[in-house]
Image (tube, grey):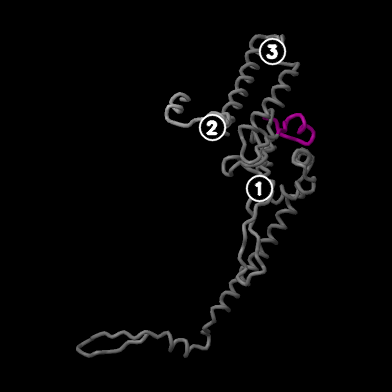
Amino acid sequence: TESKYHRHGGNLKTRSTELGSAVAGSPLTTVLPASTTVKKSIVLSSESRKELAKQAKVTKEERRAQIDGRHRYLISRLADGIDLSEQQVEETIISDDKFQLIEQFFAPSGLKKLLFFYQDVLQQKLNASRSDESTNSLPQKKLFITMGSTEDFTGTCAFFLRTSDEVITASNVSQEVDFGMLDCTNGNILQGLEFFLSQIMIPALKSQQNWGAVKEGLKNSQIQEFLYAVHKFVGTLSSSRQNIEDKIQLTKVDIDIYVRNLQNPSDYITAG
């Protein structure tokens, strides 16, 4: 308790806080040691985590029941491209909080693209060996759905692109959806894009037989100009990447052979 003195009506009075008497007089009030309070909060936190885990399990099973041939097509492409099992990919997808983007991608006139990142993500790991149950952040490879604008891109991007506004069904998903990957490990986005264009897209374009209304195909001057522009763009990417990576290096020279016999200032002037 804390005593405070107040002068009221000419008399010096003492007023004590009523915490002590309130605690003593109330049978429902208990003063808990600090350690007991901490343990109680940990128990409550544990119960909350169990409830969240229970809700997450129910949501996962509901999503698992929705999986059909369309989802199976996406899962198989991701498993092949990222070297994960189809079961691992399925568990990742139904656990993702952006699962609804897949349904939006399948819908008529839906999302034009569906992106997945596979890269190191900091995971919270409980440190059970310590009394305070602290957590450590450890990098771990993770596959997750993304819009592509909120997370840093430092690994591999797997993408699906729609070729029309038709509704995506189990029977047309292989014709209406294109799949591709960008490997930008360690954040080397320019290198990943350069490789994708030079090693995948340009060879595919050169082997293209049907150019729609352009009957001449590769012999058409506009097609040739287009391919030249793509080649030029890839060259620009390569040169930009090399400049960023400080690839311009001066040749190392052994100067000992030049200064070995220099004895006085006139020798240095002559050498210069």
**Circle 3: element type:** loop
Q: In screen coordinates, is 123 left or right of 170?
A: left
Residue 248 sits above or below residue 74 on the image:
above
Disc nearer the start of the sequence (1/3): 1
Q: Name the residue tied to disc 3.
A: 213
Identify the image quadrant of residue 204: top right
Q: Amino acid at mark 3?
A: Ala
Q: Residue furthest toward the left?
A: 10
Residue 71 visible, this orientation: no
**At 23% from the left edge and 86% from the top edge, which residue is drawn?**
8
Quadrant for residue 208, please give it: top right
Residue 138 x %, y %: 64, 55
Q: Earlier in the sequence, mark 1 or mark 2?
A: 1
Q: How many numbered tags mark residues here?
A: 3
Tell me which residue sits at (66%, 40%) in the image. Answer: 185
Span shown in magenta:
165-180
Magenta highlight on residue 122? no
Q: Where is 201 relative to 148, above or below?
A: above
Which residue corresponds to mark 1?
120
Camera-near label (1 vs 3) is 1
Can residue 254 be seen by looking at this rendering?
yes
Which of these two is toward me, 156 or 98? 156
